[in-house]
Image: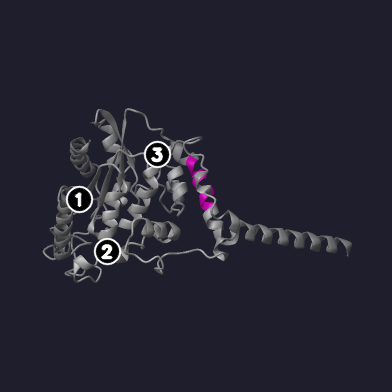
Amino acid sequence: MQNKTRLFAVILKTTLLFLLFNFAFIFTYNIPFGKLSIYNRVFPGRERFPFGETKESYNLSLFDLDAMFASHVLAGKTKTSDEYRVFLLGDSSVWGTLLTPEQTLAGQLNANLIMACGKTVRAYNLGYPTISLTKDLMILDQAQQYQPDMVIWLTTLEAFPEDKQFESPLVANNAERVRDLIFKYELNASTKDPALNYLSKQDQTFVRQRRAVADLIRLQIYGALWASTGIDQIYPQNYERAQTDLEASEDFHGITNLSDALAIDVLDAGMQAAPVPTILVNEPMLISSGLNSDVRYNFFYPRWAYDAYRQQVAELAAAQDWHYLDLWDLVPANDFTNSAIHLTPDGETLLANKLTEAIRSTCK
């Protein structure tokens, strides 16, 4: 009987301690634990942000922007007097789906040892796989502390629709950051948009946050495996090529009037965000010659919508005196991989050569 009483007391104390810890965890919510990282200390920083859902890639997707930056090589690089620091913003095409870090746009620019303003260009890959102007603005806003000399923002029409802005999980799960961006840049979006996942006090308990904590720990553990192998995504020998036979549909997000449905305010905010030269690039895309290619350029775009978008952005860039490159048709169709925006290494080389010229000519 005495043993049962002691066991009950132990269980009760353990339960009370756990409940106390669980709810006390709420008070740690605003502590940026993500900044605590063994990357750039024990392990080298990653050349691109962590992203992935398979153990074999030694990588994972998480929503902690502080942890993403802390794991990136940028966070461990002290800027030297002879470095011309270029940030590359964009989607999975910039991040480098199916490309090794050396084959990506950043990797190829760095391999070329470009000189600009009498300094050596060092490009940093800040691309992230999801398509949203707001996602790019959020990353750029966070990156300002790392002293860029130039920003190159590669984007495409799919990032512009207002209904796409909070669709990226990285955006939706950083509601407080997005709210701050809306106020800081006076964006037209609503801070109460239901797509934004604000956390209640109950959501901030350890039980509700255990996945986020586990992700932070896993990211550190994967550092050892990534550092020893260089693998940060799966490279399948065979994959389905980008679609070239298309549906005869002219639909684009249910939009009929493009000029009223695009987040131009977010684009304008991003172009003004960094106090350094910013080059806006309409990124290359696959132009199909297959079935119904007279209706659609590719899986993403009907011709009417994309043509109207190009004209609208070109006129805006001219009016605002932006550095703008429209490289939509730069890369031939056979130099795309599994998407209408994902390039082969040769396609990236074409893009890198164009941007090398732009960096040199825009350098001030």
Q: Residues within 10 Å of mark 3 (few under 14, many from 20)?
A: many
Give the residue type that dot 3 points to. Leu
Disc 3 element: helix
In the drawing, does residue 110 fall left or right of residue 7? left
Q: Earlier in the sequence, mark 1 or mark 3?
A: 3
What is the chief secondary structure element of the magenta stretch?
Answer: helix
Provide the residue span drawn in magenta.
Answer: 214-223
Residue contact between numbered discs 2 and 3, judged by CB atoms under 8 Å: no
Q: Say the numbered circle drawn on residue 161.
A: 2
Disc 1 element: loop
Give the residue type that dot 1 points to. Pro
Coloration mode: one colour
Q: Residues within 10 Å of mark 1 (few under 14, many from 20)?
A: many
Q: Identify the residue position indicated by label 1 in the image.
A: 284
Task: Locate residue 314: give its quadrant.
Answer: bottom left
Q: Position of residue 37 (x, y in %)?
A: 51, 42
In the drawing, does residue 217 fall left or right of residue 292? right
Q: Position of residue 205 (x, y in %)?
A: 59, 61
